[in-house]
Image (cartoon, grey):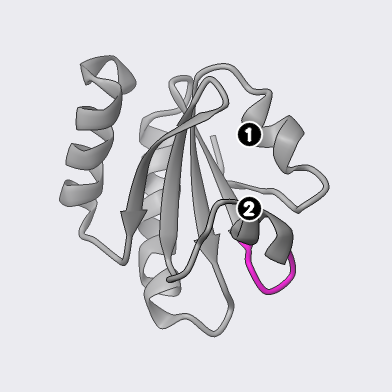
Amino acid sequence: MSVSTATDETFAAQVLRREGAVLVDFWAQWCPPCHMIAPLLAEIARERAGSLTVVKVNTDENPGVARDYQVMSLPTLLLFQDGEPVRSIVGARPKARLDADLDEALGARARV
């Protein structure tokens, strides 16, 4: 599964009304760390297809969602479970650390 894109208008349908786990990547074009983790998130999306959906939100183009969730630094990853935020990860991290954070938040069932 690939990473999808959400906007202020589609966020509720793509994240809040979706059952299961959704990892939202709040990013911006001008943010170098955002570009550093993008390939890692694509890899995580492929590895966890069926148990985790990864969605990107460009904060410059969609400030409403970022404001609603008080995103103050980029990149910020928000993990939602059944439409509710359960974990916030701020800043770029190595893939092993992202995997560990996701496993801790979701339990081993998040692994395929």
**In the image, residue 31 lies at what x, y percent?**
47, 80
Position of 106 with respect to 32 (left or right) is left
> Mark 2 sits on what residue?
68
Circles 2 and 1: CB distance less than 8 Å? no
Residue 38 to residue 79: above or below: below
Residue at (68, 74) in percent of width and height? 60
Looking at numbered disc 1 in the image, what kind of residue is underneath it? Val
Residue at image point 70% right, 66% down: 63
For residue 90, side relative to residue 42 (left or right):
left
Q: Main secondary structure of the magenta part?
A: loop
Local SS, label 2: helix
Percent x, y of residue 17: 68, 23
Q: In this picture, which residue range is highlighted in magenta?
A: 58-62
Residue at 73% x, 35% y: name it.
Answer: 12
Q: Is residue 16 left or right of residue 27?
A: right
Label 2, residues with CA under 10 Å away: few <14, some 14-19, many ≥20: few
**Among the two numbered marks 2 and 1 on one chain, the one whose residue lies closer to the N terminus:** 1
In the displayed structure, would residue 20 be above or below residue 26?
above
Comparing marks 2 and 1, which lies closer to the viewer?
A: 2
Amino acid on which disc 2 is placed: Asp
Reply above or below: 53 against 69.
Answer: above
Task: Give the distance between the C-alpha atoms of the residues marked 2 and 1, in whole angstroms.
Answer: 14 Å
> Which residue is the site of mark 1?
15
Label 1 sits on a secondary structure element that is: helix
- Residue 92 counted in the magenta span: no
How packed mark 1 is, by other alpha carbons closer than 10 Å (few <14, some 14-19, many 20 or more), is: many
